């Protein structure tokens, strides 16, 4: 594995690979690597000649500066894990390397409705920051495949839109990997390491309540099921629920009366121990 901190050095290595007609897979991350990240690296390795992973905690996507300050950084361990996973190129730029002209967005990305829903509504500016950094990283790496996790369902939809509006879709294939979970169901997340032992145990309630929703909406209204799920989280150690929402899996629009066979996704965002956790499950609606 080769570690790069400079864009120019990484690009030299990548253009050499491209000249040999090697395909390039890319896994962007914010580090504090776990099995979820490593599964994306594994998928990319299977499907490409060269795999690049970036680790960059992007300041422009944090709408809450405290969240940015507290974001876990485990650089030495990340390097070991990436090496062990058989990664080819690890890119760990500093903020000045990524944003030499400052962090402000020069023009907003036209993301449409998707930016106004769920995460977009609760984290103003978040997806603009995500697009800013992913667009920049894609222009640096110019991969054939971009590997992202279903764990961040709406983010995948936003990046799909980014590829559309930047005309990158012809060149880059977005591949969405399944959500990896701990044995008790909690979705793996870098933020989990900030949970106290008690909150870590309670956090599994988020997965439990999501798995019950497909059954619940067979016998009660979606809004009742959503409200009961939110109450369940509040009774089980969560301090605040941003949303638990059943949405159309393709458009992410809220659904009140699903039709049989309709692909749905139930998504949740809630705080426990001052840590904001998100998760989601895809399912088809059947009575
Ligand atoms: P992050 O470092 O949290 O920004 O995540 C980097 C990439 O890993 C994103 O595409 C995430 O969706 C993905 N990811 C995060 N957690 C998981 C997980 N538990 N399973 C699979 N992919 C994940």
Image (spheres, helix red, strand yellow):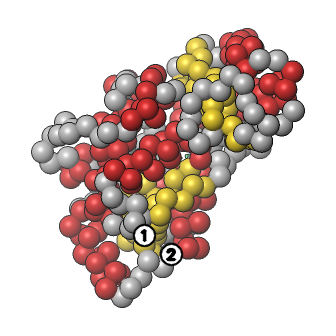
- Label 1 sits on residue: 144
From the viewer's perspective, is residue 128 above or below residue 271?
Answer: below
Q: Is residue 285 above or below residue 96?
A: above
Taking the spot 32% from the left edge, 39% from the top edge, the residue there is: 110
In front of the other: 158 or 100: 158
Q: Is residue 154 above or below residue 19?
A: above
Give the foreground label among 1 and 2. 1
Look at the numbered disc 2 and say if its residue's Cβ is closer than 8 Å to ligand 1: no
Kindly tell me whether residue 115 is visible in this rendering: yes
Q: Position of residue 22 (x, y in %)?
A: 41, 82
On-image quarter of the N terminus: bottom left
Q: Nearer the viewer, residue 170 or 120?
A: 170
Residue contact between numbered discs 1 and 2, judged by CB atoms under 8 Å: yes
Residue 3 x, y percent position in the rendering: 35, 66
Q: Which residue is mark 2?
A: 48
Q: Is mark 1 within 8 Å of ligand 1?
A: no
């Amino acid at each position: 594995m080769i570690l790069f901190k400079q864009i120019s050095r990484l690009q030299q290595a990548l253009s050499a690979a491209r000249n040999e007609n090697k395909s390039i897979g890319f896994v962007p991350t914010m580090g504090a690597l776990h099995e979820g990240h490593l599964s994306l690296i594994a998928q990319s390795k299977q499907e490409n000649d060269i795999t690049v992973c970036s680790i960059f905690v992007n300041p422009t996507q944090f709408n809450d500066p405290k969240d940015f300050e507290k974001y876990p950084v485990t650089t030495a361990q990340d390097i070991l894990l990436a090496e062990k996973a058989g990664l080819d190129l690890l890119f760990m730029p500093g903020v000045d390397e990524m944003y030499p002209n400052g962090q402000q967005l020069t023009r907003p990305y036209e993301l449409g409705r998707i930016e106004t829903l769920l995460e977009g509504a609760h984290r103003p500016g978040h997806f603009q920051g995500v697009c800013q950094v992913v667009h920049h990283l894609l222009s640096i790496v110019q991969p054939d495949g971009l590997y992202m996790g279903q764990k961040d369902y709406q983010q995948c939809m936003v990046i799909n839109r980014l590829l559309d509006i930047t005309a990158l879709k012809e060149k880059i294939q977005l591949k969405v990997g399944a959500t990896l979970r701990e044995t008790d169901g909690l979705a793996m997340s870098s933020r989990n390491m900030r949970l106290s032992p008690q909150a870590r145990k309670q956090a599994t309630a988020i997965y439990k309540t999501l798995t019950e929703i497909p059954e619940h909406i067979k016998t009660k209204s979606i809004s009742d099921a959503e409200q009961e799920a939110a109450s369940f989280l509040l009774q089980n150690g969560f301090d605040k629920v941003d949303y638990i929402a059943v949405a159309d899996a393709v458009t992410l629009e809220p659904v009140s009366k699903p039709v049989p066979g309709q692909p749905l996704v139930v998504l949740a965002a809630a705080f426990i121990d001052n840590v904001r956790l998100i998760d989601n499950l895809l399912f088809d609606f059947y009575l």
